[in-house]
Amino acid sequence: MEVQQRTVDIDGQQMVMWEHGPIDGIPILLVHGFPLDHSMWLNQIDGLDSDGERLRMLCPDLLGCGQSDAINGDMSMEQIADQLAAMLDRIGVSRKVVFCGLSMGGYVGWQFLKRHRDRVSHLVACNTRAAGDTEDAARGRKKMAKSVSRIGSQPIADAMMPSLFYSPLTLTSEDQQKRTLINQVIGSTEAQTIAKLQLAMAARPDMTPFLNQIDVPTLVVSGRHDTFTPEEEMRAMAEAIPGSTFVCVENAAHLTPLENGPAFNQALIEFLLGN
Ligand code: MLT
């Protein structure tokens, strides 16, 4: 089945998205992390083919990221959630979706569920957290937001790599290609996107009190070697979400669905389809 690229108008700005799977499949909205794009889901767009017959994957590049238009004005997790709801309206998805977000995509997920509850059938929270920033973390983000226009995005890409990927002793050529891809995606992200998304994340609310109100089936996925959103923190988060399922994926750090596609896909399929 072909991957279809579409451009959707969101209040005068063009959001580019990729779609794969049958129109009557279970819609899964895959929302990338900071400052990435749809390509971090390549194992899900490409790798879910047999079960993919039952799934309709929807992979946007958030505004400012990948091939979508730049961010106009300020940004917040709440605004991104509303833009995604508008995107679903524009492409005619009225059915409830599986919201699957990684890291910043997960921060958006809490807001999407809170603001658009009737549009969500399931939640998949990957390598993310519910807590807001510590003062230190928020300060670090503001510092980066100030410096990025001067230093450019490439040093930020290079600095982020070690915490994004698990580093075994030897890397296959496929592992290497994934690192090159992500380094290029971050390195070619506009400085103003990095600044605006960092400020948006610094200002995001603490969603910990929301966790016990979640009433959709939820899968929480962590990576065994993730130091940014560690397994123990994610396990505790899962315990606070009524009835949720927790899976920790081996051979993965912060980009679990990309680093270990087969294990992530198996967990997703078991959760959604029960096989
Ligand atoms: C991400 O992967 O989206 C970021 O690490 C999130 C963050 O900086 O909090």
Image (cartoon, rainbow, N blue to C red):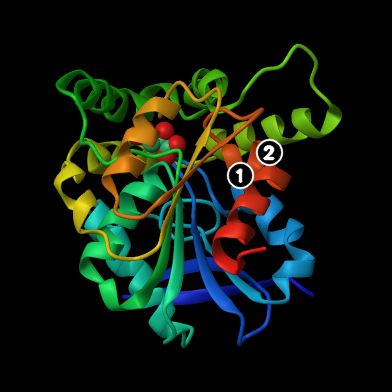
* Residue in the image at 47% along x and 76% along y: 8
Would you say residue 74 is visible in this rendering? no
Q: Is residue 221 above or below residue 73?
A: above
Name which residue lies at 39% across and 83% down.
89
With 160 as the anchor, is 256 left or right in this view? right
Q: Foreground: 81 or 211? A: 211
The one nearer the camera, 67 or 104, is 104
The span from disc 2 to disc 1 (Cα, nearest Å) is 6 Å
- State if disc 1 and disc 2 touch (CB < 8 Å): yes
Indicate the quadrant where residue 44 lies: bottom right
Q: Please name the residue shown 46% across and 84% down the image.
A: 93
Look at the image and tell me in which quarter the N terminus lies.
bottom right
Q: Which mark is residue 228?
A: none
Q: Residue furthest right?
A: 173
Task: Say what secondary structure mark 2 lies in.
Answer: loop
Amino acid carrying mark 2 in the image: Asn
Q: Which residue is mark 1?
A: 257
As drawn, is 141 to the left or to the right of 93?
Answer: left
Q: Position of residue 171 (x, y in %)?
A: 79, 21
Mark 1 surroundings within 10 Å by alpha-carbon count, few (fewer than 14), some (14 through 19), many (20 or more): many
In the image, what residue type sits under mark 1?
A: Pro
Q: Which residue is mark 2?
A: 260
Image quarter of residue 178? top right
Where residue 225 appears, as percent x and y from the top left, is 55, 22
Please tell me whether residue 86 is drawn above or below residue 167 in the rendered image: below
Give ligand 1's quarter of the image: top left
User: CB at mark 1 closer than 8 A to ligand 1?
Assistant: no
Q: Position of residue 52 (x, y in %)?
A: 71, 69
Residue 229 picture location, percent across and down? 40, 29
Q: Residue at x 19, y 58 (%)?
A: 213
